[in-house]
Image: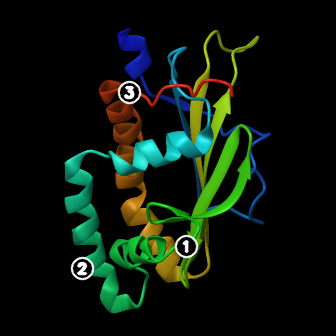
């Protein structure tokens, strides 16, 4: 497989994404793109479930540290959010599903300190790109000083995690397209 298929690129958040304009103001708004091989699924929910179920092991350790630090502040922990999904909630991993479209899924969570939405958008090849791409965009809206302090601390980790999850998914091999049926 081409090394280009493992390259994660910082991109401008797509203006046609469902997270564009999701909040009156954003405290973090970014997007990352990776090429999808021809044989990979183009279903955004399948890709989201794949990426988040197979994240690098070190991310679990980082999330446990995060949970230990924020639990005393009354914020939602990753463990609690995963349990919500295990109880039959509409979730992908720890993220609530807000919206499904044929080429995009919007995930996220609301909490007392901030709200965020995460989009996985499958962009077809066209004038701007030669191959299909998966674009992951994140929009965060903080409610208070705790939210702004939190996002200032975790923003570098967020960027590292998103890039690492996408690279890891590419390295282990994207889920295949399902035959038309």
- Asked which secondary structure carries label 1, the reply is loop
- In the rendered view, tell whether residue 163 sits above or below residue 9: below
| Spatial separation of the CA atoms under disc 2 and disc 3 | 31 Å
Disc 2: which residue: 68
Q: Position of residue 122 (x, y in %)?
A: 65, 32
Residue 29 horizontal/vertical position (percent): 61, 51
The mark closer to the camera, 3 or 1, is 1
Of the numbered discs 2 and 3, the one sitting upstream in the chain is 2
Q: Position of residue 79 (x, y in %)?
A: 33, 75
Whether residue 114 is visible, yes or no, is yes
Residue pointed to by mark 1: 89
State the residue position of label 3: 170
Q: Is residue 131 left or right of residue 47?
A: right
Vertical order, 47 against 80 (above or below): above
Which quadrant of the view contains residue 120?
Answer: top right
Q: Is residue 70 above or below residue 1?
A: below
């Amino acid at each position: 497989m081409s090394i280009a298929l493992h390259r994660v690129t910082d991109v401008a958040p797509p203006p046609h994404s469902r997270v564009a304009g999701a909040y009156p103001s954003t405290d973090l708004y970014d997007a990352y793109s990776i090429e999808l091989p021809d044989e990979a699924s183009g279903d955004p929910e399948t890709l989201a479930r794949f990426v988040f179920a197979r994240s690098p092991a070190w991310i679990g350790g980082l999330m446990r540290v995060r949970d230990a630090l924020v639990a005393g502040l009354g914020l939602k922990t990753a463990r609690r959010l995963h349990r919500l999904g295990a109880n039959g909630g509409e979730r992908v991993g720890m993220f609530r599903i807000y919206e499904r479209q044929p080429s995009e899924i919007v995930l996220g969570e609301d909490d007392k300190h901030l709200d965020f939405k995460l989009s996985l958008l499958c962009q077809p090849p066209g004038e701007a790109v030669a191959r299909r791409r998966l674009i992951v965009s994140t929009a965060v809206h903080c409610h208070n000083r705790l939210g702004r302090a939190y996002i200032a601390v975790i923003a570098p980790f967020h960027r590292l995690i998103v890039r690492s999850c996408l690279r890891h998914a590419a390295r282990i091999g994207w889920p295949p397209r399902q035959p038309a049926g």
